[in-house]
Image: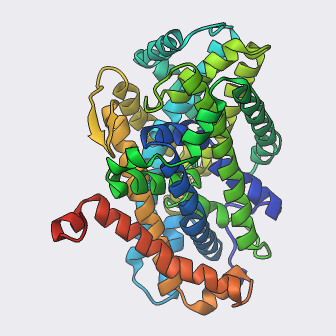
Amino acid sequence: MADTRSSIHGQWSSRWAFILAATGSAVGLGNIWRFPYLAGENGGGAFVLVYLFFVFVVGIPIMMAEILIGRRGRQSPINTMRTLAEEEGLGRYWSLLGWMGVFAGFIILSYYSVIAGWTIAYIFRTGTGMFDNVNAELSASIFSNLISDPEKLLVWHTTFMMMTILVVARGVKSGLEKAVRFLMPALFFLLLLMVGYAMSTEKFMDGLSYLFIPDFVALAKKDLFADVFLPALGQAFFSLSLGMGAIMVYGSYLSNKSSIASTSISIALADTSVAILAGIAIFPIVFTYGIEPSGGPGLIFISLPIAFGQMPYGTVFGCLFFLLLAFAAWTSAISLLEPAVTWLVENRNINRIKATGIAGMIAWTLGVVTVLSFNHWAFSFTFAGSLKENGLFDMMDILTSNIMLPLGGLLVAIFASWLMSRKSTIDELGMGDGIIYRLWLFAVRYIAPLGVIMIFLNAIGLFKLLGLSN
Ligand code: TRP
């Protein structure tokens, strides 16, 4: 039956198109903006190694599970979960997993769009030579000028959300392929250029060792689970676009012939290398110019422009860099909206254009909360051993990445490995029941669920209450 099902929303033109789209979804602000600032807040090396471990051991198997579920159901995540649960003789309430994803998607998109707005603002700031020879202090004040002005933030947030709505309304296929095929390699190339610049700075080695060598002295002061494992797990989900149905809905447009395993590995490798390159480019600059690595979400917006202000043709490269980053954010944002839109089209009997307008408006409205988090509504609190200064924005980010996405991933893993029949998953993965299948099954049955549950329990201190940890 699954073989004959087809999506009313269309299909990718090839496996390559799917890889491009999913990579476009994965590579975005998460890699270049979020990864470095979290690594900086959570102590560098240890965070990075744990993050890499999670990408390969938890992330890739769950990505495979999401794609296989999506392709088998071929509908919006909500309806896919309901259909497959019924097919496997389970309750309809599995559709709640899809609902949680839609909610997480709205929240993430709402703040993602505001940050993407900063990126657009920086295309103009770098392009007009505003950073020529600036020092760290001046760069920081240019940044705080931007985020303390809600009107500016609102303009760019609105611009970015409209761009996102435009693409999703036309259907995620058209245009996306071209954007990703040319712009991703260009972004990659510019990152390499930045790494080259970082190599020429005084503190290149300091940056590298900060990024890759765990600082055990600093670690001893931290709560390993709450301060390192949980944010690293959250970042693995965020960066790979997992846990809310984005990859599931993209999987629903994938043809039956394509291999899910090798596709997932390629996407994860591309995504991870972009994040690592961004880290290598940024931390040497951070140390050379005396910027505080734990400074939070402004990290790349303060550090990189200083480098652009120093290097030859920095105005051109800086402008281009933020332009490409905005494109990368764009191809990610559309995947955050797509699950909600497909559901509206399927269940509310409205066309895609109207559905996208409605969903986009909801996310835009919620985005106003983030706009105000950096100025009028700002307050601070401590989480994961670091000071979070942008109240509601930080809370929404923590709630989604550290809780909702891992929880979504956990349920996906349980559904695919414990509840779907072996016949269904073997049939869908299409690689027989050999060693790779068994490794995958083991990872989604045991490693991913136990990992997520252990980290959750420890992070909320339950083990402490029970006296099981020191
Ligand atoms: N992965 C994207 C990034 O790193 C953001 C993103 C897109 C996302 N779709 C998602 C995050 C779904 C979580 C879930 O920028």
Q: Which of 387 and 43 is in front in this view?
A: 43
Q: Nearer the viewer, residue 426 or 342?
A: 426
- Residue 371 visible in the current orientation: yes
Query: Residue at image x 76%, y 21%?
Result: 317
Q: In the rendered view, would you say 165 is above or below 436? A: above
Q: In the rendered view, would you say 234 is above or below 75? A: above
Type of colouring: rainbow
Q: How many marks?
A: 0
Q: Which of 4 and 285 is in front in this view?
A: 285
Q: Quadrant of residue 186?
A: top right
Q: In which quarter of the image is residue 122?
A: top right
What residue occupies the far front of the structure in this picture? 217
Query: Residue at image x 54%, y 21%?
Result: 302
Q: In which quarter of the image is the N terminus?
A: bottom right
**In x, y percent, where is residue 323?**
70, 27
- Residue 103 visible in the current orientation: no
Query: Residue at image x 46%, y 35%?
Result: 364
**In x, y percent, where is residue 112?**
51, 38
**In x, y percent, where is residue 160?**
58, 31
Query: Residue at image x 43%, y 29%?
Result: 295
**In x, y percent, where is residue 103?**
41, 53
Q: In which quarter of the image is the C terminus?
A: bottom left
Q: Nearer the viewer, residue 395 or 7?
A: 395
Q: In the rendered view, would you say 100 is above or below 390? A: below
Left/right of residue 445 with respect to residue 19 in the rendered view? left
